[in-house]
Amino acid sequence: MRTRIKICGITRPEDGVAAAELGADAIGLVFHAPSRRAVAPEQAARIVAALPPFVCVVALFLDPDRPTVERVLETLPVDLLQFHGQESAGFCTGFGRRYLKSVGMAGGDAEAVAAAHPRAAALLLDGHAPGAAGGSGERFDWSRALPTDRRLVVAGGLTPDNVAEAVDRLRPWGVDVSSGVESAPGIKDHRRIATFIEEVQRVQRD
């Protein structure tokens, strides 16, 4: 199985284009105002407009109200929603889009979160505490990865130096990186993106 790659926290059109051209399957746009990588819907629309075809656009939220999500969906074409807070399954399924549910692996009952979201397209295992924002660069203990037959996306502390090990050990559906390919918060290093993607591809050829 080929591991899919998402580059999250895109804030500039040129970074989204570079990620796509280097082989990323998806880009992530953060709609959580306290984040250093947050974008306004209008800014996000410019990023999406610059993307080549066949790139999945993921919109990330943390405990948003319904109008916030609806405004984003009205402003730009979104393929997947990603929820990082305490959102209920009913809330997550209420927008007519497939969604990813983040599972904070730094404490809490990860299995209970997973069980509460049976309709999530995938579970995103991140290094943050339950309900906290992602993008912290914190790696979780990979031995705690959920024993499940559901699709898993691994995030949290991934870098070009360790992503091959993560893919080799966990065989996830996808990997998700933000700070691990940056030169500054929200500013992607295109060389690091290229190396990250090459490492994912390399371990799958071995």
Image (cartoon, grey):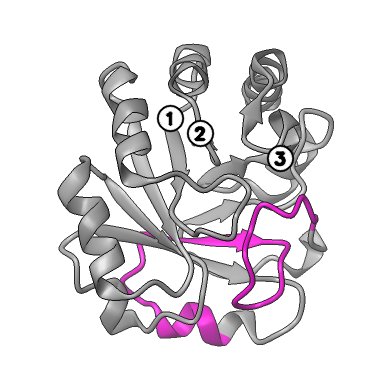
Residue 145 in the image, given as x and y percentages of width and height: 69, 65
Residue occupying the point 73% across, 62% down: 127
Question: How far separated are the C-alphas under marks 2 and 3?
Answer: 12 Å
Residue occupying the point 62% across, 46% down: 171
Residue 129 lies within the magenta run: yes
Residue occupying the point 21% across, 40% down: 77
Residue 151 in the image, given as x and y percentages of width and height: 46, 57
From this view, report whether residue 91 is shown above or below residue 42: below
Left or right: 205 in relation to 138 = left
Q: Nearer the viewer, residue 151 or 191?
A: 191
Sequence-earlier tag: 2 or 3: 2
The label shown at residue 179 is: 3
Front: mark 2 or 3: 2
CA neighbours of label 1 inside 10 A, class few (<14), some (14 to 19), many (20+): some
Does the image show residue 194?
Answer: yes
Residue occupying the point 76% across, 69% down: 144
Q: Nearer the viewer, residue 18 or 72?
A: 72
> Which residue is identified by label 2?
11
Front: mark 2 or 1: 2
Three-letter amino acid code at the position of disc 2 = Thr
Left or right: 197 in relation to 179 = left
Three-letter amino acid code at the position of disc 3 = Ser
Prevailing SS of the magenta stretch: loop
CA neighbours of label 2 inside 10 A, class few (<14), some (14 to 19), many (20+): many
Q: Quadrant of residue 54?
A: top left
From this view, report whether residue 89 is shown above or below residue 54: below
Q: Nearer the viewer, residue 18 or 126?
A: 18
> Which residue is identified by label 1?
25
Residue 10 in the image, given as x and y percentages of width and height: 51, 34
- Give the residues in magenta: 112-139
